[in-house]
C-alpha cells in the first residue's frame, strides 16, 4: 500500500524524527529530521525498521526487546517504548512513540513512529561531564521511567544505594523536561544543620537573625523556573519536614524574617538511600511528606544487578580518572571486575579503577592490577598489627623501591589520600572542577583535603 502524499508531506514538516511503515515493518517514508539524525548517508525507504535501528535480521521482540508494532497490534492504541538505536554517533537510547493508522474500514494499515533521543543517556562519556551509561535490562527499565516522567511536572523520588548515581539521574530527569534550559539546583540535605535549613532553602531578610547583615535569596529562588534536587532527603530533621511539606502542598514560602508570601516556580526531584517507609513507620519521617515526594518513585539498580554494564562503564571511567593515558582492560581483568559484589556501586568501581590505573605502568590493566587494587579493600585482621621484627626490613626495602611501591602497600584511606595528592598536584582548575573530575561533591573534596593536610602535618 502506498502512503498518501498528504501524510508523508505532513510528517516531513515535523521537527521530530518520523518514519512511516507498514505491517511488514517496511519503511515507506522518512522525514528530513529522521534522515538527518539517524541515516544521513543512506536511504532507509524500503528497508525493515529493525534492520535500520538495531541491525537485526528479525523483529525486535524476537531479539529480547519490546516491539512497539507488536504492542500496537495487540492494543490497537498508541504505544511508547525506549529502545537502544544505532546512530552515526554510536548507540543512543531513543524514546519511541508509535501511532497506528487505520483505513476507512477501521483496519490497521500504517504506523507512524516518532523518535526522540533521550538526553544524558549515551553509552559513551561526554567530554563535558559524566553521562548515564548502560544497556542492561535493569538500566533500560530505569531510563524508560525517566523518559515517561521527564516531560511532566510530577514530583520524582529516586531510591538507590549510595554510589548508584542518583544526582546523575536527577539531571537526566531535568534534561528530559521542558525546564531543561533553566537551572538544576542541588541541595545536600545531609550537610544542612537544622538551624540553617530554613534560611538556606527559603532565604532570609536583613536582620532576621544574628549575622544576617543583608537579605539573601534561598535555593528555592535560585531554582526558579527549573528543578530543585533534594539529595538525601531522608536526612532532613523532623522539625524541618513540615516546612518542606508546606512548600510542596501550596507552592508558596516565606523568607526567614519576612511576612511576604512568595510563590515557587520549581519542579522537585528528591533522592535518598534510606528506607523511607521504615522511617515513616518509626515516626522519623512524616507520612504526608513521603506521599508528596513519592508521586513517581524510580529505583536505581545497584551495580551487582547490572554487571554486564561494567564492560561499558569501565572504559568511560578510565577515560575520566586517567585522561592523559589510553588505558584498556584485559579480558581477565573485566571478568574479575564482573565477579565482585560492589557494595559501593559505580562510585566504588570508579575508585577501584583509579587505583588499578596507578598500579599499572603500561597501557593494559591486567587482572593482577585489579586484584591488587581489590586487596586494599580487605579489612586488616587485628593480629596484623603485631608485626614481626622482619617487617622493619620490608619497610626499608619498600622505601628504597620508590614511591610507587609505597603506594601499592598503602591501606585504603591512605591510598585514596595519595591519589588525591597526585591529582591535586597536576590539577590547574578550580576546586569545583576538581570535585567534578573526581566524581565527588565539593563538600567531600574539602573534607578529604583537610584529611590530606592533617596527614601532611603529622609527618
Image (cartoon, rainbow, N blue to C red):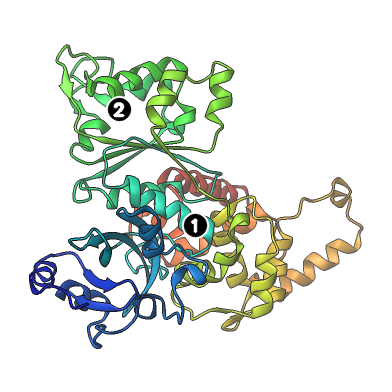
Please identify the quarter of the rendering in which residue 424 is found.
Answer: bottom left
**Seen in the image, is 26 located left or right of residue 142?**
left
Residue drawn 24% across and 29% down?
218
**Seen in the image, is 38 located left or right of residue 135?**
left
Residue bearing the label numbered 2: 201
Residue drawn 72% across and 64% down?
409
Residue 132 location (% of width, % of height): 42, 59
**Seen in the image, is 142 located left or right of residue 419?**
left
Residue 215 location (% of width, % of height): 17, 24
Dot 1 falls on a residue whose secondary structure is helix
Residue drawn 28% across and 63% down?
108
Residue drawn 18% across and 64% down?
16
Tell me which numbered mark, 2 or 1, is placed earlier along the sequence: 1
* Front-most of residues 23 and 200: 23
Residue 330's place in the image compared with 114, above or below, is below
* Front-most of residues 130 and 170: 170
Residue 458's place in the image compared with 427, above or below, is above
Q: Is residue 282 visible?
A: yes
Residue bearing the label numbered 1: 139
Q: Is residue 114 visible?
A: no
Q: Residues within 10 Å of mark 2 (few under 14, many from 20)?
A: many
Residue 190 location (% of width, % of height): 46, 32
Residue 262's place in the image compared with 114, above or below, is above
Dot 2 falls on a residue whose secondary structure is helix
Please identify the quarter of the rendering in which residue 8 is found.
Answer: bottom left
Q: Residue furthest front?
A: 105
Q: Residues within 10 Å of mark 1 (few under 14, many from 20)?
A: many
Measure the alpha-carbon separation of dots 2 and 1: 32 Å
Q: Dividing the image into 4 quarters, which one contains the N terminus? A: bottom left
Amino acid at each position: 500500500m502506498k502512503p498518501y502524499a498528504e501524510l508523508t508531506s505532513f510528517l516531513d514538516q515535523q521537527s521530530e524524527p518520523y518514519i512511516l511503515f507498514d505491517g511488514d515493518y517496511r519503511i515507506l517514508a522518512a522525514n528530513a529530521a529522521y534522515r538527518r539524525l539517524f541515516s544521513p548517508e543512506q536511504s532507509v525507504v524500503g528497508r525493515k525498521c529493525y534492520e535500520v535501528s538495531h541491525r537485526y535480521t528479525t523483529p525486535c521482540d524476537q531479539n529480547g526487546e519490546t516491539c512497539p508494532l507488536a504492542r500496537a497490534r495487540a492494543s490497537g492504541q498508541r504505544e511508547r517504548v525506549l529502545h537502544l538505536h544505532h546512530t552515526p554517533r554510536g548507540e543512543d537510547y531513543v524514546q519511541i512513540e508509535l501511532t497506528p493508522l487505520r483505513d476507512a474500514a477501521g483496519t490497521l494499515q500504517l504506523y507512524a513512529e516518532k523518535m526522540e533521543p533521550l538526553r544524558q543517556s549515551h553509552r559513551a562519556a561526554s567530554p563535558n561531564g559524566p553521562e548515564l551509561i548502560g544497556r542492561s535490562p535493569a538500566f533500560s527499565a530505569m531510563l524508560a521511567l525517566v523518559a515517561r516522567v521527564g516531560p511532566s511536572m510530577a514530583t520524582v523520588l529516586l531510591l538507590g544505594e549510595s554510589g548508584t548515581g542518583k544526582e546523575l539521574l536527577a539531571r537526566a530527569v531535568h534534561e528530559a523536561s521542558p525546564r531543561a534550559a533553566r537551572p538544576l539546583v542541588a541541595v545536600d540535605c545531609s550537610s544542612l544543620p537544622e538551624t540553617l535549613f530554613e534560611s538556606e532553602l527559603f532565604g532570609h531578610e536583613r536582620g532576621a537573625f544574628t549575622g544576617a547583615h543583608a537579605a539573601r535569596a534561598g535555593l528555592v529562588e535560585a531554582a526558579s523556573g527549573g528543578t530543585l534536587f533534594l539529595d538525601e532527603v531522608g536526612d532532613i530533621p523532623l522539625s524541618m519536614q513540615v516546612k518542606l511539606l508546606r512548600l510542596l502542598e501550596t507552592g508558596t514560602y516565606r523568607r526567614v524574617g519576612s511576612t511576604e508570601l512568595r510563590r515557587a516556580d520549581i519542579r522537585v526531584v528528591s533522592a535518598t538511600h534510606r528506607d523511607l517507609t521504615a522511617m515513616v513507620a518509626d515516626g522519623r519521617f512524616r507520612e504526608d511528606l513521603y506521599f508528596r515526594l513519592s508521586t513517581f518513585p524510580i529505583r536505581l539498580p545497584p551495580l551487582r544487578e547490572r554487571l554486564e554494564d561494567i564492560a561499558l562503564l569501565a572504559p568511560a571511567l578510565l577515560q575520566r580518572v586517567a585522561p592523559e593515558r589510553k588505558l584498556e582492560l584485559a579480558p581477565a581483568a573485566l571478568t574479575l571486575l564482573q565477579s565482585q559484589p560492589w557494595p559501593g556501586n559505580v562510585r566504588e568501581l570508579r575508585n577501584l579503577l583509579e587505583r588499578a590505573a596507578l598500579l599499572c605502568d603500561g597501557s593494559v590493566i591486567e587482572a593482577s592490577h585489579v586484584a591488587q587494587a581489590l586487596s586494599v579493600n580487605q579489612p586488616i585482621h587485628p593480629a596484623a598489627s603485631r608485626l614481626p621484627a622482619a617487617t622493619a626490613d620490608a619497610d626499608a626495602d619498600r622505601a628504597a623501591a620508590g614511591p610507587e611501591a609505597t603506594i601499592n602497600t598503602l591501606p585504603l584511606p591512605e591510598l585514596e589520600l595519595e591519589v588525591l595528592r597526585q591529582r591535586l598536584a597536576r590539577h590547574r582548575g578550580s576546586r569545583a572542577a576538581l570535585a567534578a573530575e573526581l566524581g565527588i561533591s565539593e563538600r567531600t573534596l574539602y573534607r578529604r583535603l583537610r584529611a590530606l593536610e592533617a596527614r601532611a602535618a603529622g609527618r
